[in-house]
Image (cartoon, rainbow, N blue to C red):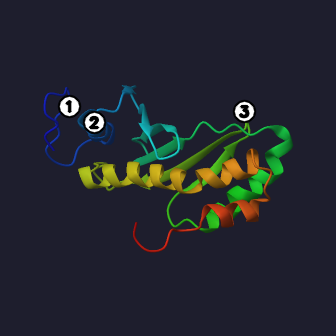
């Protein structure tokens, strides 16, 4: 991948964080990079999401976290946990979770990379797009439960209505 005038130019499979930094820079997304983590912001359809990728070289696992800035109050925790379980049943890759420390809702996906521990541009794009798409897909359901006082099943049903036809 040629990222133009960026610090990171990656032409083929690369170390996971290098590839993600190149992707972020090519898309103009702000990010910060640590020794084993990248953190940035991506605008989704409903909100701006914090995206984190953590690389564990000893396991060759790249974990992608997407946080839609949804904090769950104690009185809504039961309904939110039920909605997380229902949403996770609809997902093929990754899952939603609620961190016990602070009630933060997030999407999480762990990817085991091959023996060399390299990431392709296609993989990097797919992992980021999947995280944002899943957060966008279920964001309304969480809002319906947290702010609209709908039951988890009602919220999921209302959020999962797909438009039919063409505009």
Instruction: Kindly give the residue lying farthest to the bottom in the view shown.
Output: 165
Helix, strand or loop status at disc 1? loop
Q: Position of residue 108 (x, y in %)?
A: 54, 49
The residue located at (29%, 49%) in the rendering is 119
Residue on which disc 2 sits: 18
The part of the image, by quadrant, that contains residue 6 is top left
Q: SS for tag 3?
A: loop
Q: Quadrant of the C terminus?
A: bottom left
In the image, is 84 to the left or to the right of 64?
Answer: right
Q: Are marks 2 and 1 in contact (CB under 8 Å)?
A: yes
Does the rendering let one see residue 125? yes
Q: Nearer the viewer, mark 3 or mark 2?
A: 3
Q: Is residue 30 left or right of residue 91?
A: left
Residue at mark 3? 102
Is the Cβ of the residue at disc 3 closer than 8 Å to that at disc 2?
no
Reading the chain from its start, which is encountered first: label 1 or label 3? 1
Q: Nearer the viewer, residue 105 or 11?
A: 105
Please report whichever mark, 2 or 1, sits nearer to the chain's N-terminal start.
1
Nearer the N terminus, badge 3 or badge 2? 2
> Image point 31% across, 54% down: which residue?
123
* Residue receiving disc 1: 8
The percent coordinates of residue 58 (x first, y second) are: 42, 43
In space, the residues marked 1 and 3 are separated at their CA atoms by 35 Å
Circle 1 Cα neighbour tier, 10 Å, few/some/many (<14 / 14–19 / ≥20): some
């Amino acid at each position: 991948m040629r990222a133009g005038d960026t610090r990171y130019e990656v032409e083929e499979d690369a170390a996971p964080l290098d590839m993600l930094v190149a992707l972020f820079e090519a898309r103009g997304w702000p990010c910060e990079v640590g020794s084993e983590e990248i953190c940035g912001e991506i605008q989704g359809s409903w909100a701006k999401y914090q995206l984190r990728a953590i690389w564990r070289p000893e396991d060759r696992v790249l974990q992608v976290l997407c946080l839609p800035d949804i904090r769950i109050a104690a009185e809504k925790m039961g309904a939110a946990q039920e909605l997380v379980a229902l949403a996770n049943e609809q997902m093929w890759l990754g899952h939603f979770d609620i961190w016990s420390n602070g009630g933060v809702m997030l999407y999480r996906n762990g990817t085991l990379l091959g023996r060399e521990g390299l990431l392709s541009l296609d993989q990097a794009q797919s992992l980021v797009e999947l995280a944002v798409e899943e957060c966008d897909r279920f964001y309304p359901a969480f809002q319906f439960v947290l702010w609209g006082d709908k039951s988890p099943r009602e919220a999921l049903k209302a959020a999962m209505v797909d438009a039919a036809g063409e505009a």
